[in-house]
Amino acid sequence: MATRIIIQKPRMSFWQIWNMSFGFLGIQFGFALQNGYASSILLTFGAKVENLSWFWLAAPLTGMIIQPIIGHYSDHTWNRLGRRRPYFLAGAILSGLALCFLPNSSGLAFLIPPIIVGAGMLMIMDASFNVAMEPFRALVADNLPESQHTMGFSLQTCLIGVGAIIGSSLPSILTNWFHVSNTAPKGFVSHNLLYSFYAGGIILIGCILWTVIKTKEYPPDVYATFHEEDLEVPSRKSGLSEFFHDLVNMPKTMKQLGIVQFFSWFALFSMWVFTTSAITAHVYHLPANDTSSREFSVARDWVGIMFGVYNAVSAVYALSLPWIVKKINRKRTHAFSLTMGGIGLISIFFIQNHYLLLLSMVGIGLAWGSILAMPYAILSSSIPAKKIGVYMGLFNFFITFPQIVNSVTGSLIVKYLFHSQAIYGLVMAGVLMLLAAVSVLFVQDGKKIQIIDKP
């Protein structure tokens, strides 16, 4: 492998990295509400469990299209707000509005069936999340020296976990602490979910604004001094031709990580879509068409608590990742974490006490913490500086493609192979997570780097 000689960027303090990543807390707050409760909202509006993955198809499709485009244009942007910040600020505003509209879809029932409005809002919400999310990954690689990449992505993961804990748990908190109703007439969303989604929109926008105000980006001339060997040869292509050239010529490490990501995100998507149905039927023994009873509300809110637990574990675990990486390297760290996630998902099948499900969430939390940090830390060492945005965006293809495959096939698998028993969708997810753990051991991690301190 070739040796790169680079001038080291100045190291950033913990709080500088914290401020730079703080917007992710808000994004994940909203994302946790979507992951934990969008399926139950769609069920409330009349969706069937075996069709849930079809409604979620819009989310990865929009991500596949939007993230590479945002990455490409943010690589070529510089204005008063900077390079990446204009994009995640715009995405935050749109995401906040979508969070407020989704649970109110029934309000348009006199014009359009609420299930159609809800599916449309889910698509708009995810598109907005992608606009806000993609530049954050590139921002870490832009601002931090390579020696701090693992720390940067790990701290992002920690903040993602904190945001997800609050987002996943908020409906239950509103009900248990503030006595906000968790039931509603058939076809309407309960007040605890409604207020949670409102709070999600406000917090998301506020956290993004914090990062926009507190974080600076290197101007193009300064940025170039840290990446002279990557930037000295200008691209002879532009626009769409440059984009497809980058797609075809992506680094080998990125292609290898794509296999790992496929198994990982197919598994995660199955968990997000089918956990509510699996737990209500397999653990609480409720009929599939029961979406308005108090028992269903209790089970649904418990799924939110479960998701909060795995996000809490991921937040704590993320802070330990730089230390673990120093001991056993990035690939082994990720393989161990994915193995724990696979075991956690499979164990749900054998559990009937809902409290014991929290133990399963510990393993899933280890996997989630690593999935949000390790692939990006590995990838960031293998891509040229002038292509960070577009390659981080293209890397999202390996997240969205497995979700699209799952959206198309997941419903059919659960309906015909598993006879509409969603619990087997979680077992399948666990097996795929174990395959991801094996795959990561074959990834080429990084390049040889010679670092020269900036005088």
Image (cartoon, rainbow, N blue to C red):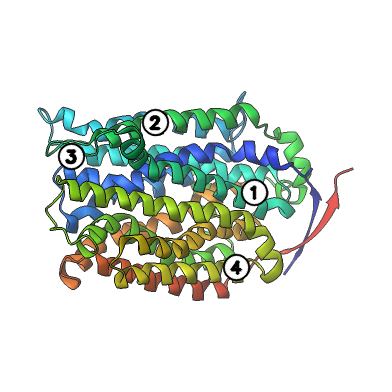
Q: Give the residue number, with chain letter if any, for mark 1.
A: 152
Gap between marks 2 and 3 measured at Cα: 24 Å
Element class at badge 4: helix
Whether the residues at callouts 4 and 3 have beta carbons within 8 Å, the answer is: no
Question: Which label is found at residue 199?
Answer: 2
Whether the residues at callouts 2 and 3 have beta carbons within 8 Å, the answer is: no
Label 2 neighbourhood size at 10 Å, few (<14), some (14-19), many (20+)?
A: some
Q: Is residue 84 above or below residue 159?
A: above
Amino acid identity at mark 4: Thr
Residue 187 in which image quadrant: top left
Looking at the rendered image, the disc whose residue lies closer to the viewer, 2 or 1, is: 2
Label 1 neighbourhood size at 10 Å, few (<14), some (14-19), many (20+)?
A: many
Q: Earlier in the sequence, mark 1 or mark 4?
A: 1
Question: Which label is found at residue 333?
Answer: 4
Is 269 left, or right, of 391 in this rendering?
left
Question: Which label is found at residue 100?
Answer: none
Gap between marks 4 and 2 measured at Cα: 35 Å
Q: Earlier in the sequence, mark 4 or mark 2?
A: 2
Whether the residues at callouts 2 and 1 have beta carbons within 8 Å, the answer is: no
Gap between marks 1 and 4 measured at Cα: 16 Å
Gap between marks 2 and 1 measured at Cα: 27 Å
Amino acid identity at mark 2: Ala
Q: Tell me the residue at 33%/68% (across/down).
A: 348
Amino acid identity at mark 1: Gly
Whether the residues at callouts 1 and 4 have beta carbons within 8 Å, the answer is: no
Q: Tell me the residue at 67%/45% (across/down).
A: 234
